[in-house]
Amino acid sequence: MDKELDLSNQRVCVTGGAGFLGTHLIKKLKEHGAKQIFVPEYPQFDLVKSEDIVRMIEEAKPDVIIHLAAKVGGIGANRERPGEFFYDNLMMGVQLIHHAWQMGVEKFVAIGTICAYPKFTPVPFKEEDLWNGYPEETNAPYGLAKKMLLVQSQAYREQYGYNSIFLLPVNLYGPGDNFNPASSHVIPALIRKCLEAKEQNAKEIIAWGDGSPTREFIYVEDAAEGITLATMRYNSSEPVNIGSSFEISIKDLTELIARLTGFEGEICWDPSKPNGQPRRKLDTTRAKERFGFEAKTNFEDGLRRTIEWYANERANGRG
């Protein structure tokens, strides 16, 4: 393990710090001693624009940048706007790393995506398999845009000795997630469907695909802890998976969420809708070995907390 960075005397800039993962990450950074945290907010800082990135670095004078900001969405959003997802994510990341290096920011933490892995990666996904094929088509533009930050991170370390790291978190879930039906991922989408069906006494819900794909999920607080530990302890450009090593089929997940929300109707599968990648499960050995991270939250406990949070938001007119 590398020498640990003392966060108490570091100025940390968290792009996307007002978002789902960002709000949890900021809490974790503070728990680990960080006192000076800057969150650039849109539209004051549009990180697709080079001049806004330069202004942000000049104003915040960060020692560390953790780049969480991303244009993200589920399968539907990725299919409708692949060009936007590619361009915005690539421009943000590539220019941020470049200006951070150029302007003397000591460390850069790039957050990649599990969508960067090839469609038919052997399970569990190992970091060395990242380049053994093309990603799943529905989210390839997004996945490849983020993967370029790994290429850049390694190239800048090799040529300039720049300390940037690249982390690959698996699908997140937890309180504060995005429950907007147009752009949400599978867990919040299913929780919302089940709660709405229950409120309306509906006899059934429609779920996408055929239920056969498997996914791994990590509770958002665990992911925030993993990113914080990597920021403090990891200084290499080899990519690192951040996951829970827990795999569940979409069918079992849907049935579990129905049970936990109290929806007793029928689950109808719509095979005309895409399944996405067939299987996803990570090998998380490297994170444990290199910076001592292991996910702690039991999946069912995490789901209960997420459902409680969202049910409370709906009860207060916010959901």
Image (spheres, rainbow, N blue to C red):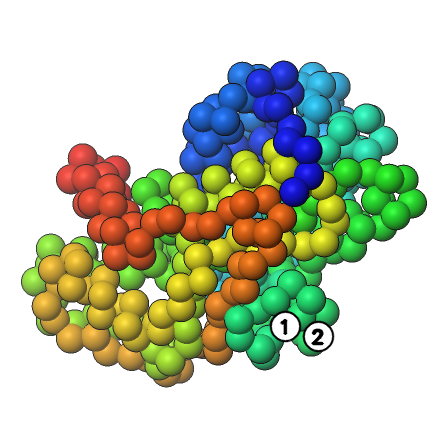
The quadrant holding residue 184 is: bottom left
Image point (29%, 67%), residue name: 253
Residue most extreme to the right: 159
For residue 313, side relative to residue 239 (left or right): left
Position above or below: 101 against 258: above
Residue tagged by mark 1?
Answer: 118
Q: Residues within 10 Å of mark 2 (few under 14, many from 20)?
A: few
Image point (60%, 56%), residue name: 286
For residue 168, side relative to residue 62 (left or right): left
Residue tagged by mark 2?
Answer: 132
Comparing 48 with 262, the one in front is: 262
Comparing 82 with 300, the one in front is: 300
Q: Position of residue 131 (x, y in %)?
A: 72, 69
- Do callouts 2 and 1 mark residues in contact (Cβ within 8 Å)? yes
User: Callout 2: helix, strand or loop?
Assistant: loop
Image point (64%, 31%), residue name: 4
